[in-house]
Image (cartoon, grey):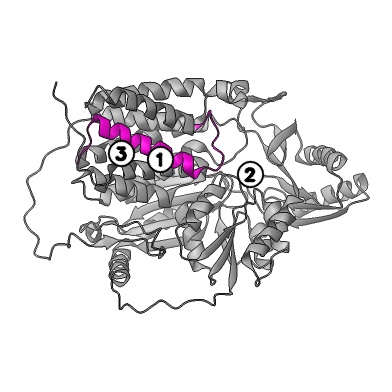
C-alpha cells in the first residue's frame, strides 16, 4: 500500500498547525493547573515556547526534515518558558537528533525521532516524575515504535501515537494523587496531546493543501551560500553552538521591529485586558502576545512601526522595560558573527577578569528589584509568577553581566530548569543557585561575596537559603479542592514554602495565622515582610504593629516589595 513520507514542507506545516492548535486551547490547559494561585500557567508557557519555535520554522528552509527540525529545536530552546516549556524544548531537541541527516521521514523514521525526543527529555530532568508530560510523551512514542514495526505509513503511526497520548493522559490522575484529588489530568500532558493532535490533523489532510506557486525569478542579488551558518550571538561555547541555515529572505521581512515591553497598570486605572490589547495590535504586525496579570502585562509584537504600538498600549498603563530590536540589523550582526566564528584569524573578544563574579536575579516589583540591586545583583530580569522568563531572556542577562563567573537566582521553582538550560549555552562559568522564592534569593545574596572561589560561594549561598521559610499571601483564581481545603474563587490563600496551608477573607488575618503555624513548628528569630503593589504603606505598617504584639520575641522588619498578585511575601529565619 502506498504512503506519503513526511518531507520538510510537510513537517513545517505540521509544526505551524500544532502551534496554532495549542494556542487555541492554552486556556483549557491553564485551567488544569492544580494550584488555584495566579502562577505561571502551563498552557501559556508551552504556547509561548511553541511560538518561539514557529518563528524559527517560518524563517527556515524546508527542503528537508532535518532543517525544519533543527529550526524547531533552536527556537524552542531559546524560547522555553517554565518547566513545561523546557521539557517541551528537550522533546524537540531529541526529535531533531532523530531527523539529523534525513530528507524525509517514513513511519519508522517518525517513530524513532519521537522516541529520541523522549530519551533526551528524560535525561534532561534530574528526577523525572510520572503522571506528567513525560509520561504522555513516553507512552505515546512507545506506541509509535510498536506500530512502526509493521506499518511504514507515517499517518497511521502518528494516529497510534495520538491515541496512546490520550490514553496516557487519562491515566495521569492514577499516577499523581494530587491530580486525582483535584479531578483533573496533567496540564503539561494535555498540552502535548494538543500538539500531537495538531501534527495528525496537518499530516492527514485536515488542512488545505499548500498552494503551489511558480518558482520566483532570480533576484539580482547574490544567493546566500549554502554553507553559511547562523549562531546565537551570545553563545560562544563550541559544545552549545547550534548551527542552522540562514534564510536569505530574513532581511526582507515585512515587520522588522521586534518590540517587547511591560504595561504597568496606572494607579486607580482599569485592569489591563489582554485580549483587548492584542486585538488592538492585530493590524500593526504579527507574532503578537500579551501575557501576565491585570496589573502587569508583557507585550510582544513584530511591527513595521513601533510608534502606534506604544501609543495604543500607553492607554492602559505605564510602559516599562521597553526593548526594540531591528531584525534586519540583527540579521547583519548574525552573519558578521558567523563569519568571525568560522575565521581562525578573527581577533578574540575583550574578556572580563577571570576572577570577576556577577549575579543575575529574576524578580518582579520595584521594591524587590531595588533590594536585590542593593545587595549586589548586576542584572535583574523582570519575571516570576505568570511571567516566566525564557531561556533567551536568561542567557542575554548572563551575557550582559560584566563578569566571567555568573550566579543566577531564579527565585521561582518554575524557572530553575530554564536557568540551567541557559547556563549550558554560554562560555561563561554559570552557577545556578536553585532559589524557589524571593526570600530564598535575598538570603542567598546576603552570603554573596563578589570574589573568591565560585564553588564554595555557591555552597554558602545554598546553605543560607536553606534556613529560610517562605510565606506568601495571594488569592484563588478558581474553585478547587486541595488536600482537605475547599477553595472558592477569590479566597485569600496562605502558602508555606509553596504549599497552600489555609484560606481566609483578609490578607492580614491569613498572614498572621500562617505565621503562627510557622513559628510554632520552626522557631526562628527574624520575620521579614514585603508588601505588594496593592497594599499601601500605612496598611503594611499596621500589620507590622500587630505582628510585634503577637510575636514579641521576634525581630520584625518590613519593606516595600511592589510585587503584583501577592499581597504579602514574608520569610521566617
Q: Secondary structure at mark 2?
A: loop
At x 92%, y 47%, the residue is 549
Mark 1: few/some/many CA within 10 Å (<14, 14-19, 20+)? many
To which residue does mark 2 refer? Answer: 565
Mark 2: few/some/many CA within 10 Å (<14, 14-19, 20+)? many
At x 40%, y 57%, the residue is 259
Mark 3: few/some/many CA within 10 Å (<14, 14-19, 20+)? many
Q: Residue furthest front?
A: 149
Q: Image height check: is 276 above or below 316? A: above
Quadrant in the picture for the N terminus = top left
Q: CA distance from mark 2 to mark 1?
A: 32 Å
Which sits earlier in the primary sequence, circle 3 or circle 2? Answer: 3
Q: Quick check: is 127 in the magenta stretch?
A: yes
Q: Quadrant of residue 489?
A: top right
Question: Where residue 15 is drawn, which disc sits there?
Answer: 3
Q: Secondary structure at mark 1?
A: helix
- Apparent side of residue 91 relative to residue 342 in the rendered image (left or right): right
**Predominant SS along the magenta part:** helix
The answer to the question of whether label 3 and label 2 lie on touching residues, with beta carbons closer than 8 A, is no
Q: Image height check: is 312 above or below 475? A: below
At x 69%, y 31%, the residue is 491
Which sits earlier in the primary sequence, circle 3 or circle 1? Answer: 3
* Residue 383 screen position, x and y as percent: 56, 52
To which residue does mark 1 refer? Answer: 91
* Residue 336 screen position, x and y as percent: 29, 70
Q: Quick check: is 167 in the magenta stretch?
A: no
Q: CA distance from mark 3 to mark 2?
A: 34 Å
Which of discs 3 and 1 lies nearer the camera? The answer is 1
Q: CA distance from mark 3 to mark 1?
A: 13 Å
Amino acid at each position: 500500500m502506498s504512503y506519503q513520507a513526511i518531507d520538510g514542507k510537510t513537517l513545517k506545516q505540521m509544526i505551524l498547525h500544532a502551534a496554532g492548535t495549542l494556542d487555541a486551547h492554552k486556556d483549557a490547559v491553564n485551567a488544569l493547573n492544580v494550584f488555584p494561585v495566579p502562577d505561571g500557567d502551563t498552557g501559556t508557557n508551552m504556547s509561548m515556547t511553541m511560538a518561539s519555535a514557529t518563528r524559527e520554522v517560518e524563517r527556515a528552509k524546508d527542503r528537508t526534515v532535518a532543517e525544519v527540525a533543527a529550526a524547531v529545536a533552536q527556537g524552542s530552546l531559546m524560547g522555553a518558558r517554565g518547566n513545561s516549556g523546557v521539557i517541551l524544548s528537550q522533546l524537540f531537541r531529541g526529535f531533531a537528533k532523530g531527523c539529523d541527516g534525513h530528507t524525509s521521514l517514513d513511519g519508522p523514521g517518525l517513530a524513532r525521532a519521537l522516541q529520541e525526543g523522549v530519551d533526551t527529555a528524560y535525561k534532561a530532568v534530574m528526577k523525572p516524575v510520572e503522571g506528567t508530560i513525560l509520561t504522555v510523551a513516553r507512552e505515546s512514542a512507545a506506541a509509535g515504535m510498536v506500530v512502526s514495526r509493521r506499518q511504514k505509513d507515517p499517518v497511521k503511526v502518528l494516529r497510534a501515537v495520538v491515541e496512546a497520548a490520550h490514553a496516557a493522559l487519562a491515566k495521569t490522575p492514577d499516577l499523581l494523587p494530587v491530580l486525582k484529588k483535584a479531578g483533573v489530568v496533567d496540564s503539561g500532558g494535555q498540552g502535548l496531546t494538543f500538539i500531537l493532535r495538531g501534527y495528525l490533523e496537518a499530516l492527514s489532510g485536515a488542512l488545505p493543501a499548500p498552494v503551489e506557486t511558480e518558482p520566483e525569478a532570480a533576484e539580482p542579488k547574490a544567493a546566500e551560500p549554502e554553507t553559511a551558518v547562523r549562531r546565537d550571538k551570545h553563545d560562544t561555547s563550541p559544545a552549545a553552538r547550534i548551527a542552522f541555515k540562514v534564510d536569505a529572505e530574513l532581511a526582507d521581512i515585512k515587520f522588522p521591529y521586534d518590540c517587547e515591553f511591560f504595561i504597568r497598570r496606572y494607579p486607580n486605572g482599569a485592569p489591563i485586558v489582554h485580549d483587548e490589547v492584542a486585538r488592538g495590535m492585530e493590524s500593526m504586525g504579527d507574532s503578537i502576545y500579551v501575557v501576565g496579570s491585570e496589573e502587569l502585562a508583557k507585550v510582544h509584537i513584530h511591527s513595521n512601526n513601533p510608534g502606534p504600538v506604544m501609543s495604543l498600549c500607553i492607554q492602559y498603563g505605564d510602559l516599562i522595560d521597553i526593548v526594540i530590536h531591528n531584525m534586519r540589523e540583527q540579521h547583519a550582526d548574525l552573519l558578521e558573527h558567523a563569519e568571525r566564528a568560522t575565521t581562525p584569524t578573527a581577533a578574540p573578544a575583550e574578556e572580563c577578569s577571570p576572577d570577576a563574579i556577577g549575579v543575575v536575579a529574576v524578580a518582579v516589583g520595584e521594591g524587590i528589584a531595588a533590594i536585590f540591586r542593593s545587595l549586589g545583583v548586576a542584572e535583574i530580569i523582570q519575571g516570576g509568577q505568570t511571567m516566566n522568563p525564557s531561556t533567551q531572556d536568561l542567557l542575554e542577562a548572563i551575557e550582559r553581566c560584566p563578569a566571567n563567573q555568573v550566579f543566577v537566582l531564579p527565585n521561582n521553582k518554575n524557572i530553575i530548569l530554564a536557568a540551567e538550560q541557559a547556563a549550558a549555552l554560554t562560555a561563561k562559568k554559570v552557577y545556578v543557585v536553585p532559589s524557589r522564592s524571593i526570600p530564598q534569593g535575598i538570603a542567598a545574596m546576603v552570603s554573596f561575596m563578589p570574589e573568591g572561589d565560585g564553588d564554595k560561594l555557591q555552597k554558602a549561598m545554598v546553605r543560607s537559603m536553606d534556613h529560610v521559610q517562605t510565606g506568601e499571601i495571594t488569592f484563588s483564581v478558581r474553585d478547587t479542592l486541595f488536600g482537605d481545603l475547599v477553595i472558592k474563587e477569590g479566597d485569600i490563600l496562605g502558602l508555606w514554602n509553596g504549599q497552600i496551608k489555609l484560606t481566609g477573607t483578609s490578607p492580614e488575618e491569613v498572614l498572621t495565622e500562617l505565621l503562627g503555624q510557622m513559628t510554632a513548628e520552626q522557631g526562628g528569630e527574624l520575620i521579614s515582610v514585603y508588601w505588594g503593589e496593592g497594599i499601601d504603606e500605612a496598611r503594611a505598617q499596621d500589620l507590622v504593629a500587630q505582628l510585634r504584639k503577637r510575636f514579641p520575641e521576634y525581630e520584625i522588619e518590613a519593606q516595600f516589595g511592589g510585587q503584583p498578585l501577592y499581597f504579602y511575601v514574608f520569610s521566617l529565619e
